[in-house]
Each structure stands twice: as C-alpha cells, then as structure tokens.
Image (tube, helix red, strand yellow):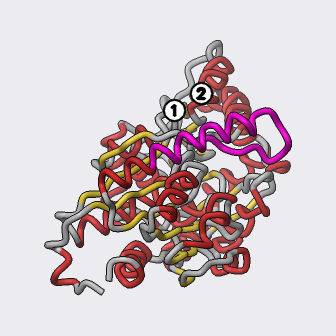
C-alpha cells in the first residue's frame, strides 16, 4: 500500500461513476474530495449521463466530467427493456474506449444505472474497482456489479447479506462532504441566512424531497401555506410583521412548475420560498432550524454531520423499504421523528411546527443527538480501502 507521505506525488487517473440522484453523486464527490486532498497530482474523472443530475453537479464541484450512455432497465416486462439494452451496449463501448484512452488506476462506483457499463468495462479490461452502497437495502446496479469488485463499502451493516463478492466487504458508513461538518454552528447559521437573504429572527424550516422532489411533501407544505394566509392576516392586524415559521420548499425540478401554478393566484406570502432545486444545499441546511424530508441514506448522514433535528417521511416505494431503515437509525438515536408518507399532510405539519415552536428544548436535544451520530471519517476510511485493495 502506498504510504501517506508518498501519496502527494502519486500521478495517474481515477474514474468515478455514479449518478441519477444526489444520493449517488454526493458520496462520490465526498470520496473524490478526500482523494484529491491526499493525492493532489491525481487526475479524477467522473463519468455519467448527459441528462443526469451529475452532469450539472460534478463540474460545479470542480471535477472533470465525461458523459456516457446509460439507461435504467425496467423492473417489469416492457418495450423499454430493448431501448435500455441498446443504451447499455453503447455505454459499455464508450466506457471501454475511455478506459483504454486514460488507463485509470482504479474505478469507484457509487450506484445508479450509469455504473453498470463503466464497471462492466472495467472488469473486462482488468481494471480494479470499488463499489460503495449507501442504503440498508442495495440497488440493482450495485448488487450486480459487486461480485467482481476488489472491495465493497457499505453505509449500513444490514446491506452485507445482499452481496456476493470476490472482494472484501467493509462497513464504512456514508461519506459526507467536509462542508457539512463545519456549517453546524450558530455563527454559520447566521452567515447562511445573510447570504441567502433569509429572516434572521424567525424559525426557518427547510422542506426537501431530494433531488427528484416529493409530491406528498410539496402538497402538504402548499396546503399548510394556504391555511396560514388567514393566520397571517389576523396576526398582521395586531402587529406590523409576521414572526411565525418561514418555509423553504425545494420542490424538485420536475415538480416546480406545478407548485408555482398552485400559488400563482395566492396573495403575497411572507413565510414561503419555493425553489426547484438547491444547488448550495449545505448553505440552506445551515440556515435552517428544522429539516423535513425523505430519508435517503446520504440525507441522513448529512443531517447528522450538521447536527440538525429532522422530521423524516420515508419514500414508501423505495426498494426493500430501505428509507425506513435509514430513518430508524436517527429516530432510535433520538435525533428525528418519522411519519409514514400516507400520514403526512398539512394538519400533521402544523402539529409538528407547533411543537417545534413550543418545545424548543426537546428539539435542541434532537440536534445534539444528531451530531453524536455523525460518522466523520467515512470518506478517509474509504480512501484507505482504495489504497489497501487497489493501489498497492
């Protein structure tokens, strides 16, 4: 294994592949950031689809990005199967050419259908690769590609029983970008609010259904906002300003226009900001007092890293119900509340917000509990595994 002191002079190329959703992209970015810190002369290249979120997020993070063909295989018999096969074949050919062109030392896959052609090509050309699985129940791409992996890293120990692999399995937790650990302070919160031009003296609630958005969370938030209009009118009759909760709703890009249409005829609302997608999610999370959202594995890790209390509504159709398992780790640790998707609505949201305002000490305890669950060294541990198993 290459020693720490020699890593700063290591040259060559490492490929990363993973995408489709932020839950696959951000772990890859966290690992790549730590790898770049230890090996500044190493070239890191991400490969993903041109239409995926990775095509936008990766270059913004300062890494090279090369698009390749890939498409998800349908879970049920469908004509889309043949189109997916064609995309896979094209992607596999493109990935083979890239590997021959750049001769990477290793490939890191963090899940999503885009991994399949890259890791398949890596195996064929005898390039070692590592798979990182974020969830308690692994996705299809990772299950299929893990068999020939040099190493498999897991966010949750419960995922181990689903893998058959010739390589070693390590439970590392989920890597989180460094900025999440530094933005959990009161000073960072104040700075984030000023940067985002948010109220400094009101409780701020961030609601996000992940990069793709969540219809149930959007509807509950918008219905709550509609009900609040009469409350605000009555409050303004007694005071000059509204001091209640301020909601930031990240609808997801695909659901943004529908949300805007719902509110276009509503009166001005001094308690609601609607955004399609938050590129600077760490800053928005730093500004928030409470976060309401889905329970993706990376989201849960980021909440813990920043020490933010949360209300988690697991996606009910996630494979193996893995989001419920993810959420339970925070709930059992005293850091979060959890609601079933079918039970989350404007009334439930109002109950939560009332409790948040009236029982501040209980939510402060959840914040402390969240911070205690943070897994700081995950990215560094995965980099050590990369060197131990592939860059010897």
Q: Quadrant of the N terminus?
A: bottom left
Kindly identify the residue that appears in the image at 57 percent across and 72 percent down. 148
Secondary element type, mark 1:
strand
* Quarter-of-image position of residue 197: top left
Report whether 289 appears left or right of 209: left
> Mark 2 or mark 1, which has the lower sequence index?
2
* Residue 365 shows up from this direction: no
Q: Main secondary structure of the magenta part?
A: helix
Q: Which quadrant of the figure contains the C terminus? A: bottom left
Mark seen at residue 256: 2
Q: Secondary structure at mark 2?
A: helix
Residue at figure coordinates x 79%, y 48% from the top left: 75
Closest to the observer: 315 or 134?
A: 134
Query: What range of the chain is rendered magenta?
Result: 70-95
View extreme (top): residue? 265
Q: Say if mark 2 contacts mark 1, CB within 8 Å.
A: yes
Q: Is residue 90 magenta?
A: yes
Q: Is residue 51 above or below residue 149?
A: above
Q: Is residue 220 visible?
A: yes
| Residue 205 x %, y % | 55, 47
């Amino acid at each position: 294994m290459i020693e720490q002191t020699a890593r700063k002079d290591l040259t060559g190329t490492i490929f990363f592949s993973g995408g489709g959703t932020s839950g696959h992209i951000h772990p890859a970015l966290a690992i790549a950031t730590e790898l770049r810190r230890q090996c500044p002369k190493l070239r890191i290249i991400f490969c993903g689809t041109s239409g995926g979120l990775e095509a936008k997020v990766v270059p913004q993070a300062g890494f090279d990005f090369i698009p390749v063909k890939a498409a998800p295989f349908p879970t049920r018999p469908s004509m889309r199967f043949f189109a997916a096969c064609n995309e896979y074949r094209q992607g596999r050919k493109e990935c083979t050419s890239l590997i021959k062109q750049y001769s990477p030392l290793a490939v890191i896959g963090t899940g999503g259908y885009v991994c399949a052609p890259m890791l398949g090509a890596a195996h064929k050309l005898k390039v070692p690769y590592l798979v990182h699985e974020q969830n308690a129940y692994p996705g299809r791409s990772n299950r299929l590609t893990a068999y020939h992996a040099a190493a498999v890293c897991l966010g949750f120990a419960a995922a181990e029983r689903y893998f058959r692999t010739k390589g070693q399995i390590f439970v590392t937790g989920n890597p989180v970008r460094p900025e999440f650990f530094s933005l959990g302070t009161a000073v960072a919160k104040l700075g984030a609010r000023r940067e985002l031009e948010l109220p400094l003296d009101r409780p701020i609630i961030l609601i996000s259904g992940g990069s793709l958005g969540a219809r149930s969370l959007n509807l509950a938030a918008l219905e709550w906002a509609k009900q609040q209009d009469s409350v605000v009118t009555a409050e303004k009759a007694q005071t000059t300003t509204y001091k209640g909760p301020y909601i930031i709703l990240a609808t997801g890009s695909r659901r943004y226009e529908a949300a805007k249409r719902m509110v276009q005829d509503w009166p001005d609302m001094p308690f609601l900001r609607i955004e399609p997608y938050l590129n600077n999610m760490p800053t928005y999370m730093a500004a928030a007092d409470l976060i309401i959202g889905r329970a993706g594995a990376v989201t849960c890790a980021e909440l813990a890293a920043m020490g933010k209390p949360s209300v988690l509504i697991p996606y009910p159709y996630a494979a193996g119900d893995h989001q419920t398992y993810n959420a339970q780790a925070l709930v059992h640790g005293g850091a979060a509340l959890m609601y079933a998707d079918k039970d989350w609505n404007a009334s439930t949201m109002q109950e939560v917000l009332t409790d948040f305002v009236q029982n501040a000490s209980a939510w402060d305890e959840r914040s402390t509990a969240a911070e205690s669950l943070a897994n700081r060294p995950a990215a560094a541990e995965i980099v050590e595994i990369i060197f131990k198993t592939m860059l010897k």
